[in-house]
Amino acid sequence: MGVTCVSQMPVAEGKSVQQTVEILTRKLELLGAEKQGTFCVDCETYHTAASTMGNQGQAGKLMYVMHNSEYPLSCFALFENGPCLIADANFDVLMVKLKGFFQNAKANKIESRGTRYQYCDFLVKVGTVTMGPSARGISVEVEYCPCVVANDCWNLLMEFMQSFMGSHTPGIPSMFGNKHDSIYSPGDTMAQYMELFNKIRKQQQVSVAGIR
Amino acid sequence: ARSDEGVGRRPRRRKRGCAGGARTGAGGALEQPVKRGAPAAPPYREAKTMEAPPVTMMPVTGGTINMMEYLLQGSVLDQSLESLLHRLRGLCDNMEPETFLDHEMVFLLKGQQASPFVLRARRSMDKTGTPWHLRYLGQPEMGDKNRHALVRNCVDIATSENLTDFLVEMGFRMDHEFVTKGHVFRKGIMKIVVYKIFRILVPGNTDSIEPLSLSYLVELSIVAPAGQDVVSDDMRNFAEQLKPLVHLEKIDPKRLM
């Protein structure tokens, strides 16, 4: 996977989530990007059950199990500031077996779904982030496929994002700082999504006032 | 007659292969701005890797079939190994003889339940680039005394190399580890493994090992969806063909404790 930047697009003043997504995708299409299917990234939260906590003597940890339609046969499991495990789809079956030790906080399930665009060597995915039935925000994922070293192409990525995100272009993701010259991997993208989802979960729900 | 090299021939100029659109950093503009309404990009831009994966959008969660492992075990003394391997080569599917050297670590997660949750992490020591193998094995199914093999639920997961760090983060602790070295054969869906177990003398150091016994463990197994008990008949028939070199039987691990 090429170097990827995942960020949040704020909802436009007086518009709904849906409308903001449409504005963004229209800008991309005017730029010349081609629609190429859809995508979905989802995240489930597990927390250590009370039974294990007593023995470990540490605060309960949150484990995130994520899926990305770009890698349909894989499952990503991560701890915040911890290791990210990349496993095959059977990992979900294992989590069911571990029910007694890790509880699935079903209400916390969050996902981003939307359209996938290709523009030259870039892949752009604009998604509506939903938690249950409500839309909570917009995610924008931009990937520059040919390059796998984060710091080598950040400037190019930023320039491209400015062409359709304007002033909402994000700053350099904090994790790029740690990477130096190491190869970018899909686990890094999932970690960025996890940060984004956590941020959105903490935000207030998108105000309904803007919807006519 | 060899052709005359160099005389009257232009020096060959080789074009350096350029890596497609790999333009890096330096704040440069994109190489070819795409004009509105421009025709489709030239073929070399349509890299196959950028197409959306050909699957539905539904995430792959749950709803999987429960897989069961059917198992028969036996052992042979070191001196009988060669004749057993010879017999297996004849009976099993024709394939390149495959040997393996693996390192297995067994992790436990202790909770309030009486019995801890056991997971097995296995990696190849001689084949590079292979994923780690995480395995869960359930309790043996107590059922039909006529069933010829040990049956238990199993979940097999391929993972990235940071598996042990991740298990520790989840709360698992390593209980024991060992090295296995042996041969693997296949007959249809049956897997036959003949291997020796080695004790690791210094924890974490797989270079200093010693054999646990003067014999090789022989295992005949099938991993199949639940409800396919008929496979145990096939296993029994195959086991018959290995007698008297080795007697494969259903060994209940609980009875050994």
Image (spheres, helix red, strand yellow):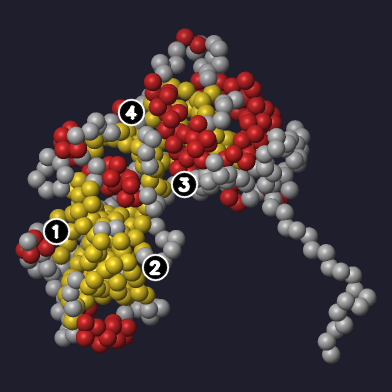
Which quadrant is home to the C terminus of chain B? bottom left
Q: Which residue is mark 4?
A: A108
Q: Position of residue B117 (x, y in %)?
A: 18, 48
- Label 4 sits on a secondary structure element that is helix
- Label 2 sits on a secondary structure element that is loop
In the foreground, A136 or B224: A136
The earlier-in-sequence mark between 1 and 2 is: 2
Tell me which amino acid carries mark 2. Answer: Asp
Residue at the location (43% across, 63% down)?
Answer: B128
User: Can see residue A114?
Assistant: no
Q: Position of residue B8 (x, y in %)?
A: 93, 75
Disc 1 packing (10 Å; few <14; some 14–19; many ≥20): some
The earlier-in-sequence mark between 3 and 4 is: 3
Tell me which amino acid carries mark 1. Answer: Pro
Of badges 3 and 2, the one in the foreground is: 2
Of badges 1 and 2, the one in the foreground is: 2
Q: Which mark is residue B140?
A: 1
Query: Do labels 1 and 2 touch, CB within 8 Å?
Result: no
